[in-house]
Amino acid sequence: MTPVYSLVIPIYNEQAVLPLLLRRLDALMDALDGPAEAILVDDGSRDASPIVLEAKARADARYRFIRLSRNFGHQIAITTGMDRARGQATIVMDADLQDPPEVVLEMVAKWKEGAQVVYAERLTRDGESAFKRFTADLFYRLIGRLSDIQIPRNVGDFRLVDRRALDAFLAMPERDRFVRGMFAWIGFSQAVVQFHRPPRAAGETKYSLAKMLRLAVNGLVSFSDAPLRLALWAGLAFSTLAMLYGLWVIGMWAMNADFARGWSSIIVLVAFLGGANMLVTGVLGVYVGRIYAEVKRRPLYVIEREVGAVEAQRPAQRDDRLQRRA
Ligand code: UDP
Ligand code: MG
């Protein structure tokens, strides 16, 4: 029986929360008005998570288990799950119950009203540090300014997507997957449900500062070329200033003024321009690095093991899709 609903859950070292999660998922699937499947994507956990998840997938036919060969990161883990989803509506949610299963029912109601993408907006975020909230706010302001697409604020990856929207998403070939930006980009009729985000049910965050930073840079670079244009404007500004300075020097010379002082100011200028040069080269380097990653055309992820409903049609590889279109 093909499911109507696919639940995609990325999991990285979540053994503390799994018993609770699986119970809540059972309840959610019972509450849904059609057959559902839960796709548990283990993102290379090093704790007991894969053992618990695999046992669940073997015991309950509604569950499927996929283990990636290493830690590929949250965005790739949810892409893996979405690749395998067979439902008419696919819902992505975190394992730590910060995305409450009850909210899924509200999303489904909006979907039935005709929305093709339903995202969940966080009204409050309990149990998150002031630092995290501040940096998240800053990031969304920045990307709102710098990119052409509007990524809704206070929205993570907790969302329901219709089959059509999902297929559009899966056809996007890029390696750098900033999933929330990609869903903002594809359009379709979008709706929103609001919820209060509770703290993590158990365990601690799997998003280290480094991972958060990488996500932010990824998002900016994939959806904005403003940093590249920065070089143009900064260059223009510096040359204008240099020209004005040159005119001033000539003026002083013409008036025979004694102005041969200020070697230090020259050093400061040279050092500053050297720094600006390096900065801009660095920005270029970031984009060139992205191009390099794209041309290598490596697969997005590597699957180590898969349990449950494997006989289901295998999704086409992204590269096949590209070749077919070419
Ligand atoms: N996660 C993952 N791979 C990673 C990091 C996180 O699959 O490399 C999963 C994690 O298990 C959880 C979800 O992504 O289900 C969100 O992570 P977390 O709750 O730690 O992030 P936070 O809510 O603190 O931003
Ligand atoms: Mg969380």
Image (cartoon, grey):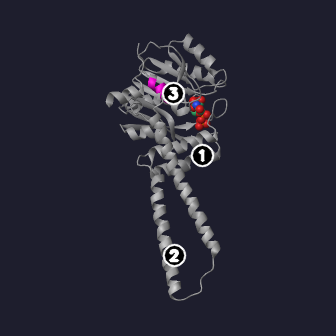
Q: Residue extending furthest left?
A: 325
Numbered range of the magenta stretch: 77-83
Q: Is residue 35 above or below residue 139?
A: above
Q: Quadrant of ligand 1?
A: top right
Q: Is residue 163 above or below residue 136?
A: above
Q: Which residue is mark 1?
A: 133
Q: Position of residue 41 (x, y in %)?
A: 54, 24
Q: Position of residue 68 (x, y in %)?
A: 55, 23
- Left or right: 325 with respect to 236? left
Q: Amino acid at mark 3?
A: Tyr
Q: Amino acid at mark 1?
A: Arg
Helix, strand or loop under label 3 = loop
- Left or right: 126 with respect to 107? right
Helix, strand or loop under label 1 = helix
**Which of the numbered marks, if any, corresponds to residue 245?**
2
Q: Position of residue 112 (x, y in %)?
A: 37, 28
Instruction: Answer yes or no: is residue 73 visible.
Output: yes
Helix, strand or loop under label 2 = helix
Cα–Cα span, label 2 and label 3: 55 Å
